Structures are given as C-alpha cells and as structure tokens.
C-alpha cells in the first residue's frame, strides 16, 4: 500500500477501519483481512474455504476476489445452525470494515442457489443503502448476473425502489441495470432495446439527488453508444419539460454523442 503509513495499513488489513477512497479499497490485503476478522466473528470454519477460494482467483481482478470470498463465506454461513448463522450475518452486515460488508453483500445474494430474483434484490437492499460508497457499488455488482438473466423481471421489481426516500436505493435501481456499467458484463438486451427500461428512467428523470441524476445520465450515455437515436429522442422530450434536475441529466447524458458529433450541443429545450 504505497503512500499509507504503517498504522493505517495495519488498521485496514485488521478490519479496524473503513477505507476512505478507491485507492485504499483496491489496496486491501483481503487474505490478511479474512484471517483477522473471520475467527473473531465465529467463522473459523469458513477460513479454510475462503482462503482456497481466494487463491483460485488471486491472479484476477478485485471483482473476482470479492465475489469468491463473499460466496465462500455465504456457503459457510448456510451450513451453520440458525442462531449462529443469524449472528454471523449480523456481524458481517455491521462490521466497521467496508470490505467485510462488501463480502457480505455477495454472501447473502449468491450463496443460496434457491433464491429467486426478488429475494436476491431484497437481500442486497441493505447494502444498496450502505453509508460507504464502496459497499453500494459491490451491492449492485453482486446481483448483476441475476438482473442480466431476467432484465424485465428486474425492472418490474426495481421500479418500486425508485419511490424510496433513500437516494442510495433509488440510485441502485438505475445503476444495477446500466447497459454497460463498470466492472461488469454488459446487458445486451438493454444496449439494443433501451426502451425496455424507460418506465424506470422516467420515474427518476427529475430526482433531486445528484447521485441519482449522475446514474441516470450515465445510463443514457451507455445507451447512446448503441442506440443513439433513442437517446436523442428521449433527451429532446425530457428537455422540453423545463425541470432543472432533468436538464442536468440530459446535459450529461449526451456527452458521448456530443464528442462524436451526433449532437452539436445539448438538445434545445422547446418550452
């Protein structure tokens, strides 16, 4: 961890502190962290399988390691007696380390093969609402494969999330179904038929939280790379509504089309 004082490095790898930026998130020694925290949480039995799972993906990126460790933890928790499993899940969910909480997001959404999409999304919701930016990102990444496998079902479920009072939850609704996204596979159906998600996007087009606005704008920017005509038409329609939050979304949504000359400037508002 270049640039970190030894005390900070030790605190992060011992699970005694949360990361404060992406660089720290990426620099966590996940093996050291697992060895430090799992025995203290009554998950000694999980340690061997967790380390074995991590070793298999050690040469791959952080997303592979997070998923592998989280899945191994989740499978170990499923084998515990009910009371111990409940205590373990609660400990993981509320751990001071954002990396541990991120493992938990994978554990609760991926370990039980019998869960349906709605149950997986419900399990992810506390992590979607987490106070730490990293946990919120891992939450939608954890459910992304299941969302991609049933796009229309996911949109039907997530549409209700757009009415949440929590902007983090509202943001999850759009971020989890982005056509391209970050650190995840693309959703081909939404790249070619973005209109499928229009009801959900409409519900968020005037959101007052910039965190949500940026997600919606990024969603449309993703779509503009494969469905530019649809994005232009939608932005032109939204631009006529005269809502500042919507105007901000439109301006950011058109950035790729602006660079490639598909639009000279922001869509003109006809009010």
Image: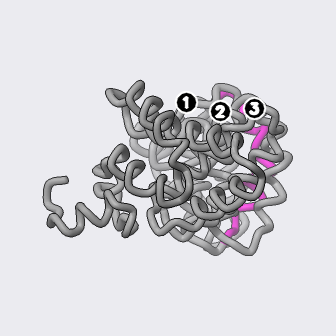
Query: Which residue is found at the position 83% from the left and 38% from the top?
Result: 116
The image shows residue 140 at horizontal and vertical percentages of: 61, 48
* Colour pattern of the rendering: one colour
Q: Which residues are magenta?
A: 190-207
Q: Secondary structure at mark 1?
A: loop
Q: Nearer the viewer, residue 177 or 119?
A: 119
Task: Of the two numbered discs 3 and 1 on the same chain, state the one appearing first in sequence.
Answer: 3
Task: Of the two numbered discs 1 and 2 on the same chain, state the one appearing first in sequence.
Answer: 2
Query: Which residue is found at the position 76% from the left and 62% from the top?
Result: 162
Q: Residues within 10 Å of mark 3 (few under 14, many from 20)?
A: few
Which quadrant: the C terminus? Answer: bottom right
Task: Of the two numbered discs 3 and 2 on the same chain, state the one appearing first in sequence.
Answer: 3
Q: Secondary structure at mark 3?
A: loop
The image shows residue 181 at horizontal and vertical percentages of: 53, 41
Structural distance between the alpha carbons of marks 3 and 1 = 20 Å
Q: Which residue is mark 3?
A: 113
Q: Quadrant of residue 65?
A: top left
Query: Which residue is found at the position 47% from the left and 30% from the top?
Result: 53
Structural distance between the alpha carbons of marks 1 and 2 = 8 Å
Q: Secondary structure at mark 2?
A: helix
Q: Which mark's residue is nearer the viewer, 3 or 1?
A: 3
Contact, mark 1 vs mark 2 (Cβ under 8 Å): yes
Q: Which residue is mark 2?
A: 145
Q: Can residue 253 be seen?
A: no
User: Is 191 one of the magenta-colored residues?
Assistant: yes
Q: Nearer the viewer, residue 235 or 152?
A: 152
Q: Which residue is mark 1?
A: 185
Q: Is residue 28 above or below residue 183?
A: below
């Amino acid at each position: 961890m270049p640039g970190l004082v030894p005390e900070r490095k030790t605190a992060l790898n011992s699970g005694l502190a949360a990361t404060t930026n992406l660089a720290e998130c990426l620099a966590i020694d996940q093996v050291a962290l697992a060895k430090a925290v799992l025995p203290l949480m009554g998950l000694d039995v999980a340690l061997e399988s967790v380390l074995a799972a991590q070793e298999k993906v050690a040469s791959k990126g952080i997303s592979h390691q997070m998923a592998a460790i989280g899945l191994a933890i989740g499978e170990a928790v499923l084998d515990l007696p009910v009371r111990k499993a409940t205590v373990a899940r609660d400990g993981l969910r509320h751990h001071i380390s954002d990396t541990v909480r991120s493992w938990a997001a994978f554990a609760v959404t991926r370990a039980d093969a019998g869960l349906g999409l709605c149950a997986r999304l419900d399990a992810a919701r506390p992590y979607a609402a987490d106070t730490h930016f990293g946990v919120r990102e891992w939450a939608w990444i954890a459910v992304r494969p299941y969302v991609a496998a049933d796009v229309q079902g996911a949109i039907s479920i997530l549409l209700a999330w757009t009415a949440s009072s929590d902007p983090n939850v509202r943001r999850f609704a759009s971020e989890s179904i982005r056509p391209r996204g970050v650190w995840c596979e693309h959703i081909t159906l939404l790249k070619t038929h973005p209109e499928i998600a229009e009801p959900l996007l409409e519900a968020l087009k005037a959101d007052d939280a910039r965190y949500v606005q940026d997600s919606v704008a990024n969603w449309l920017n993703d779509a503009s790379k494969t469905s530019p005509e649809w994005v232009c038409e939608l932005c032109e329609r939204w631009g006529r509504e005269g809502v500042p939050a919507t105007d901000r979304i439109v301006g950011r949504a058109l950035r790729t089309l602006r660079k490639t000359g598909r639009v000279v400037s922001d869509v003109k508002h006809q009010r």
